Amino acid sequence: MKYFLKININREHRWLSIIYLLLRLSVILIMLDQLRNKSYENVFLCILTLILFLIPSFIERKIHIDIPDTLETIILLFIFSAEILGEINAYYLIFPYWDTLLHTLNGFLSAAIGFSLIDILNKHERFSISLSPLFVALVAFCFSMTIGIMWEFLEFGVDSLVGSDMQKDTLITSFQSVLLNEEGKNIPVKIDIENITVNGKVWKGYIDLGLIDTMMDLIVNFIGAVIFSTFGYLYIKTRGKGNFIKRFILETHIDKTQP
């Protein structure tokens, strides 16, 4: 417990250190409350969150990559919003667009990480490559979309194996299907649904089992990836002009002159 709360507050990264400490303290208090209520699944989520909080500092120390304070703060808040607020406090149900917002942000952040990895190689003297701004932006976009797709694979796998509901269902009142075409033609028939009955309970619509949620997640991930990739392209084209994008770009602090 002391390890998770241990953090050095210095002047250069004072606000980041304070945010780190407050978030960790909040998670620990929530974990103790969940432990008192014997909600062991939520206790596991709290422990997972504390471990995820350690990843940025681990990357900076062990892999020698500097993460800008702005990016690191957003990553920490993202983890807290997804695991603690979203899952334990049920924000996914209370606020309909909470999941959409997080997936959009995920697309943006994943593109930033993919962009940074390529940009580091592109600037490093040890690598005799010079990639065009358009190619770097395209790689960042593809990296982000790959992360988004892999996450949807994870959600589907967990739902199938564990019986959870990460791919949230959607209640719809109409749909189109060729299966219901009585003439057997490949022409979709629109069906308006007044109600359906599930185990004796009447619902005012058809329960879509995760498909719409998955596609919406990928669409907003796409939007986030496009936004950052566009900014990233302009950043390389006008290197040194503008400070906004620099807040999201990883930098290596390995000596470029090393043999």
Image (cartoon, grey):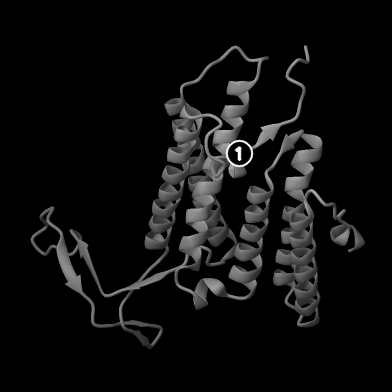
**In the rendered image of this protein, does residue 172 appear above or below residue 223?**
below
Residue 41 position in % (x across, y down): 70, 70
Side (left or right) of 174 relative to 119: left
With 25 as the anchor, is 70 left or right in this view? Answer: left
Tell me what residue is drawn at x 45 percent, y 34 percent.
Answer: 234
Which one is in front, 130 or 40?
Answer: 130
Residue 70 in the image: x percent, y percent?
64, 50
Placement of the C terminus among the 4 image quadrants = top right
Q: Is residue 47 visible?
A: no
Residue located farthest toward the right when viewing the structure as drawn: 2
Q: Is residue 70 visible?
A: yes
Q: Residue at x 72, y 77 (%)?
A: 39
Q: Nearer the viewer, residue 185 or 131?
A: 131
x%, y% of residue 214?
43, 57
- Residue at the extreme front: 241
Q: Residue furthest left?
A: 183
Residue 183 vertical position relative to residue 11 in the rendered view, above or below: below
Give the quarter of the figure containing the N terminus: bottom right
164 vs 105, nearest the viewer: 105
So how many labels did they put on this image?
1
At numbered mark 1, what does the secondary structure look like: helix, strand or loop?
A: loop
The structure residue drawn at horizontal position 50% and vertical position 67%, both measured from the top left corner, is: 98
User: Looking at the rendering, which quadrant does residue 191 occupy?
Assistant: bottom left
Residue drawn at x 12%, y 56% as measured from the top left = 187
The residue that disc 1 covers is 249
Few, some or many residues within 10 Å of mark 1 (<14, 14–19, 20+): many
Question: Could you tell me the amino acid type at mark 1?
Answer: Ile
From the top left corner, tell me how far across and down residue 219 is, in percent: 39, 52
